[in-house]
Amino acid sequence: MIDLLGGAGLAPLAVCAAPGQSLPMLPTEVMVVRDAQPHGGPLNGLAAGLSALEPMAPRALVCPCDSPLLCIGLARVLLERSASVAVGLCGGVAQPLPGAYDTAIGRLARELINRGKYRLMDLLEAAPAAMIEEAELRRLDPGLGSFLNCNDQESYARAKKLAAQSV
C-alpha cells in the first residue's frame, strides 16, 4: 500500500498501528502513528492517524493495509468530494474504507471514543458524509477490488482473480 500510494504522489504517508505492534521495514518518509490505547477498535486508529496528519494535510485517504487492489482513480474521486467524509456505497452499505476524511474529523472520532463508540460506522453516522453510489464506483473500479480486504485464503483468491481480469 505504501508503494501504491506513494507512487501515486499521495503524501504524507502514515501507518497506524497498535501499541507494541511490530511492523515491517518502512521507508523513512512514512510516519508511524500508534493508537492511543490498545484494543481500542478501528476508530481509535483512525483518530490517531488523522490527528497526527492534521498539521500537515487538511484531508487524508484512509485505507486498510490489506487492500492491494485499491484503484488510485477511485481514491482521487474520494479525495475530491467536498464533505468531511467521502466513502463508497456497495450493495447499499456504506464502506468506511477506503475513504477520504478531513483530518480535523479526528477530534470528532476522539469524542466518540470517549463516549464508548469505537466503530468506523459510528463516525459515518456522526459526520457530514458524501456517499458515492456503486454505479459511479464501478465506472472507476468495475470489480470493486478497492473494497476487497485480503485477510483469508478466500479473499486472496478473489483478489488474484480480479487482478488477472484487470490486466
Image: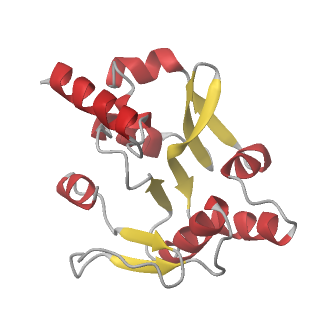
Q: Residue furthest left?
A: 167
- Determine whether 147 is above or below 93 in the image: below
Q: How is the image coloured?
A: secondary structure
Q: Position of residue 164 (x, y in %)?
A: 16, 24
Q: Is residue 28 left or right of residue 152?
A: left
Residue nearest the observer in this picture, 79 or 27: 27
Residue 104 visible within the image: no
Q: Residue furthest top?
A: 135
Quadrant housing residue 116? bottom right
Q: Position of residue 69 (x, y in %)?
A: 29, 38
Quadrant housing residue 162? top left
Count of marks placed on residues: 0
- Determine whether 114 is above or below 132 in the image: below
Q: Is residue 82 left or right of residue 127?
A: left
> Residue, x 23% and y 77% (percent of image)?
25
- Determine whether 20 is above or below 95 in the image: below
- Determine whether 137 is above or below 46 in the image: above
Quadrant housing residue 15? bottom left
Q: Residue furthest right?
A: 115
Give the quarter of the figure containing the N terminus.
bottom left
Q: Is residue 3 left or right of residue 55?
A: left
Q: Position of residue 114 (x, y in %)?
A: 83, 72
Residue 35 visible within the image: yes
